[in-house]
Amino acid sequence: MLQGKVALVTGASRGIGRACAVALAEWGAVVAVNYRQNEREALQTLSALQGDGHFLLQGDVADPEVCRNLVEQTVKQAGRLDILVNNAGIYEPLPFSEPEYMHWQHAWRRMFDVNFFSAVNLSYHAVRAMRREGSGKIIFIASRAGIRGEANHSHYAASKGAMVVLARSMAVELARENIQVYAIAPGWVATDMAAEPLKQRGESIVAQIPVGRVADPMDVAKAVRFLASPDADYLTGITLDVNGGSYIR
């Protein structure tokens, strides 16, 4: 389904990003595996990919110049870019009772730099590469929190909600150029990022999920793979909920 396609997946050293890289490679894509600093885990992702031609790209996507370089290096090494998965992100608590205003400001800026502006900047450069090929797919890993909100994580929810609106806006603007844009909104997923809250209150979390379990990263990755495939070419601007029925709209 994805033979001959090239994908760039950010934050792919573990969790959802690793699963996306694995899923895309299973269907024949060549994958550029971005990671911020953990080369050992990134190499584990690389070794798990089927097929040949996959490669690592190190860089912190919070830096706009890194975003430019990631796209340029992908095109340089693989010859093209067909699929961008904006997955890199952070998840940190920040209640409105936070007493230190400067910390509050820094936390909001860092959250948006990593979760949202990285996706904006990567998409800007990816669109230019995709135009040369006459097609492309851009997929944002948003969150259920970006749709329904989340107490004590307002900056995280806002950054993910901004992704959803960005996907809709880009989809309308780029549809005539055969570039489709999507968001995916997972609920709880069994990743390192979610490990602590799942450990502390896993039973109460699962009790709110009708299917009776937390998502595996591959549940999200299979949705990404479907949207990246030709089967989803007539879909654009949508947000695909992957939450086990915990939030239906």
Image (cartoon, rainbow, N blue to C red):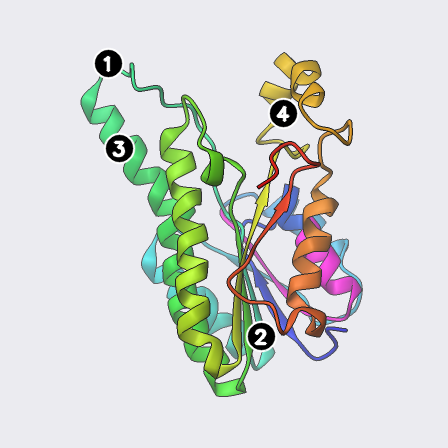
Q: Which residues are magenta?
A: 19-36
Quarter occupied by residue 228: bottom right
Disc 3 to disc 2, C-alpha distance: 34 Å
Q: Which mark is residue 188?
A: none
Neighbours of disc 3 within 10 Å: few (<14), some (14-19), many (20+) = few
Above or below for 35 versus 182: above
Percent of width and height locating residue 151: 42, 22
Nearer to the camera, 197 or 66: 197
State the SS at label 2.
loop
Going from N to C along the chain, the mark reached first, 2 or 4, is 2
Q: Which mark is residue 106?
A: 3
User: On the image, numbered disc 2 is attached to which residue?
Assistant: 82
Q: Quadrant of the N terminus?
A: bottom right
Nearer to the camera, 104 or 51: 104
Disc 1 to disc 4, C-alpha distance: 27 Å
Instruction: Give amino acid for label 1.
Output: Pro
User: On the image, numbered disc 1 is attached to which residue?
Assistant: 99
Q: Residue at x 30, y 19 (%)?
A: 96
Q: Residue at x 43, y 65 (%)?
A: 123
Percent of width and height locating residue 205: 65, 20
